[in-house]
Image (cartoon, rainbow, N blue to C red):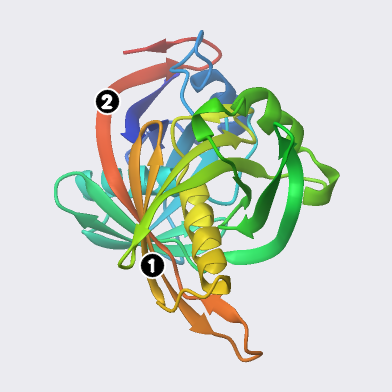
Amino acid sequence: MDRIPYVKLVGAGNDFVLVDALQGAPTKGTDWAALARGLCDPRRGEGTDGLLVLGPSRRADVRMRVFNPDGSEPAMCGNGIRCLAWYAHKSRAAGASMTIETGAGVKRARIRGAHRVRVDMGIPVFRRRFDGFFRERGRPVDADLIDAGVPHLVCWVRDVSRVPVGPLGRRLRQDRRLGRAGANVDFARVVASRAGRSTLTMRTYERGVEGETQACGTGSVAAAAAFARRALRDGVRRRRFTVAVRVPGGVLRVELTARRSTVGRTAFGPAFLEGEVLPVSTGAHRLNGRSAR
């Protein structure tokens, strides 16, 4: 067989092609990096944000591998794992509550209703706070470097809509202060915050995609965690945070709880990411060729 069947799914504007290696797809010996470059190419494939591979696991109910359009393989993808969880349940590979092996460890996901998926994303790790990481129209922009399964630089800007995400994100993503591998770059702003519920607006430049995407799950977790940490430093007394993150493709919900660490500093428990997943289409990709629906 010279075709690999796939399903196209969208999670809050992030679109993916998913290959089901549990259902007899001809995946033995597949060069997944090359397949991702073909499937995600807008001319030869679907032009999506990434390739998801659903496979067996000895540590969890199923395993997820994710590949960027450039063929690189990140450890984690927040909207990707939500899409894969929805499909795994729909295809009866897993129940409504499942565990998923990823490059960032085993994650728990739960199907909530027909099209909503909630994932325990683990504990976000704070790497560094930057005062005046760069300047926006002459004003210093503060930022937080956070690991939410993959590294994110969350930049707090005055007007998200006016940020030149492509060129600025490309420059910041490779800044030497972020380490050799760089980081994804999120441009965020607090829209509202009251009674334990807050709203952020955010746009993201994703490494591996090397451009702006319509949504980013790990970026939403990173932005929510960075916001909560700054709020606590500013004297906010609450410990539970529910944050709606508005991205170009929709809205993602993040929940997290602050707790005191043994050294007296504020740390967080696991962050939960929830949002909608929708199926779009099915197709088959000809190896070394084009996709056909």
Where on the picture, by quarter, is residue 12?
top left
Determine the residue positioned at 27% across, 43% down.
276
Q: In x, y percent, where is residue 195? A: 30, 67
Q: Is 58 placed left or right of 282 in the picture? A: right
Viewer-side label of 1, 2: 1
Callout 2: SS: strand
Residue 104 drawn above or below residue 23: below
Give the quarter of the figure containing the C terminus: top left
Determine the residue positioned at 51% across, 17% down.
287
Residue 105 drawn above or below residue 88: below
Where on the picture, by quarter, is residue 20?
top left
Determine the residue positioned at 42% across, 13% down.
291
Callout 1: SS: strand
Q: In x, y percent, where is residue 5? A: 36, 25
Where on the picture, by quarter, is residue 162?
top right
Q: Amino acid at mark 2?
A: Val
Mark 1, other Cα within 10 Å: few <14 / some 14–19 / many ≥20: many
Q: Which residue is mark 1?
A: 241
Q: Which residue is mark 2?
A: 280
Q: Is 181 placed left or right of 193 in the picture? A: right
Q: Amino acid at mark 1?
A: Phe
Mark 2, other Cα within 10 Å: few <14 / some 14–19 / many ≥20: few
Residue 84 drawn above or below residue 49: below
Report, in whole angstroms, how far the alpha carbon at label 1 lies from the one at label 2: 32 Å
Q: Is 115 placed left or right of 34 in the picture? A: left
